[in-house]
């Protein structure tokens, strides 16, 4: 665990992920005088509430890292590429939430519940990449099944909250919803499509050759890297839904070893970071509203794939599930802080 007197700088402290990182540090009792908040020049001079007082926000620059031990990067890839080397040169370990270093062989890509041991591979000062939010949530949910049965294939559809596109997207959803309820035409800025009362293909760049968007490509490449399994077959469809925060995902997986539904269910007992909400009688399953603000990935709708045959013992390799998890916390800020915890364990 990060000692509460460890100097930490949060880069992008005013954004959706940065604010969450600061809220987690605050809830852990991290000393206010050991948290430095930096963002763009636009935010310099503003304040963030913290532990009954406030943190002053400064403009990020070379001096931001002097005397700091950990830098939590919660800004764009460009900022990470330009300032992470500066932070490390100042002796600061970097955990980056952007996609800048996720394919860098010198930067471990880590989900603590899945491949936390990779942190030990980091050079000093460490540079560790936080995976894509949809990938983190999926892999935390699947880890009990991967450990017990192995996984050969994943077909997954995401239901992604607008806050995955940053703080400005939350405002866009709120303003559009109010406008449309009042009979006014929605104005779009962050997304090309209206996000209120709508569902649309993920806003990341579409690759015309493959038909995959950027988010789908990340889910494929990052799953393979985190699992150290270039053979795993991942077929994602990534979509935005009019939800403020917490992503949901529907997955059908092919196990390496056939299992019955009760064996799959039993694999989740005691699993780290995952909780089942799977009450068929009450028709109660994970929802993004329930997952919002929590640290847990909620899994439900566990069922043997009705489209595949079972053996005499009721076993099949194909199973379905649904999950909801807060992508601002476990999909970003919390995962990054848990990685920093592991640096101290190391
Ligand atoms: N949102 C998610 O669910 C999620 C999940 C996983 C990973 N991520 C990744 O996390 C990062 C942050 O995402 P976000 O959703 O928090 O975005 P956001 O809400 O748009 O926040 C961006 C942050 O970056 C800061 N920033 C912009 N230009 C800067 C500069 N020149 N120098 C220093 N700081 C600068 C912004 O400061 P100002 O307020 O001053 O502009 C703001 O604090 C992104 O790389 C994103 O891909 C996001």
Image: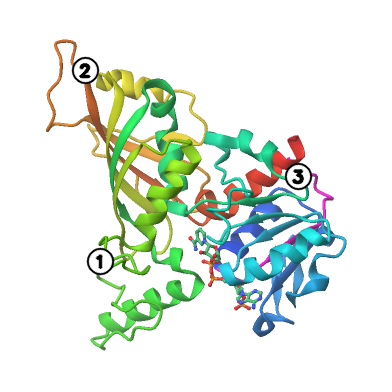
Residue at image coords 54%, 52%: 329
Q: Which residue is mark 3?
A: 2
**Image quadrant where residue 223 sits:** top left
- Magenta region: which residues? 1-15
Nearest to the eye among marks 2 and 3: give it. Answer: 2
Rate crowding at label 2 as few (under 14), some (14 to 19) or many (20 or more) other CA atoms within 10 Å: some
Along the viewing direction, whichever of 148 and 179 lies nearer the viewer: 148
- Residue 134 in magenta? no
* Disc with the residue nearer the chain's start (1 vs 2): 1
**Image quadrant where residue 276 sits:** top left
Rate crowding at label 3 as few (under 14), some (14 to 19) or many (20 or more) other CA atoms within 10 Å: many
| Residue 66: percent from left, percent from top | 86, 65
SS at mark 3 in the image = loop
Residue at image coords 73%, 74%: 60
| Residue 270: percent from left, percent from top | 49, 24
Residue at image coords 19%, 11%: 313
Vertical comparison of 321 with 215: above or below? above
Horizontal relation, residue 121 to residue 238: left or right: right
SS at mark 2 in the image = loop
Residue 199: numbered disc: 1
| Residue 138: percent from left, percent from top | 40, 43
* Disc with the residue nearer the chain's start (1 vs 3): 3
Residue 315: numbered disc: 2
Rate crowding at label 1 as few (under 14), some (14 to 19) or many (20 or more) other CA atoms within 10 Å: some
Q: Is residue 94 visible?
A: yes
Along the viewing direction, whichever of 140 and 181 lies nearer the viewer: 140
Along the viewing direction, whichever of 210 and 201 lies nearer the viewer: 210
SS at mark 1 in the image = loop
């Amino acid at each position: 665990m990060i000692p509460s007197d460890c100097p930490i700088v949060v880069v992008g402290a005013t954004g959706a992920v940065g604010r969450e990182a600061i809220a987690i540090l605050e809830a852990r009792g991290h000393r206010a005088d050991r948290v430095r908040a930096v963002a763009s020049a636009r935010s310099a001079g503003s304040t963030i509430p913290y532990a009954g007082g406030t943190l002053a926000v400064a403009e990020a620059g070379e001096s931001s890292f002097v005397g700091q031990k950990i830098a939590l990067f919660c800004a764009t890839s460009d900022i990470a590429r330009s300032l992470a080397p500066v932070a490390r040169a100042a002796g600061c370990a970097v955990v980056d939430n952007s996609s800048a270093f996720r394919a860098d062989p010198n930067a471990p890509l880590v989900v603590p519940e899945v491949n936390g041991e990779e942190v030990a591979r980091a050079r000093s000062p460490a540079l560790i990449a936080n995976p894509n939010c949809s990938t983190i949530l999926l892999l935390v949910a699947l880890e009990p099944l991967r450990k017990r049965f192995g996984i050969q294939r994943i077909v997954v559809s995401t239901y992604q909250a607008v806050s995955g596109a940053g703080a400005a997207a939350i405002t866009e959803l709120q303003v559009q919803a109010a406008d449309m309820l009042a009979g006014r035409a929605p104005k779009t800025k962050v997304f090309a499509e209206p996000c209120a009362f709508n569902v649309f293909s993920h806003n990341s760049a579409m690759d015309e050759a493959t038909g995959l968007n950027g988010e789908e490509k990340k889910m494929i490449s990052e799953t393979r890297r985190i699992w150290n399994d270039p053979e795993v077959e991942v077929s994602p469809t990534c979509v935005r839904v009019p939800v403020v925060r917490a992503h949901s995902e529907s997955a059908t997986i092919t196990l390496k070893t056939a299992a019955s539904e009760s064996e799959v269910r039993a694999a989740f007992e005691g699993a780290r970071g995952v909780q089942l909400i799977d009450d068929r009688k009450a028709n109660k399953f994970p929802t993004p509203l329930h997952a919002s603000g929590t640290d847990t990935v909620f899994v439900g709708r566990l069922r043997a794939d009705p489209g595949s045959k079972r053996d005499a013992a009721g076993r099949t390799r194909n199973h379905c599930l649904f999950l909801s998890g807060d992508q601002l916390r476990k999909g970003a800020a919390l995962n990054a802080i848990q990685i920093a915890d592991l640096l101290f364990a190391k």
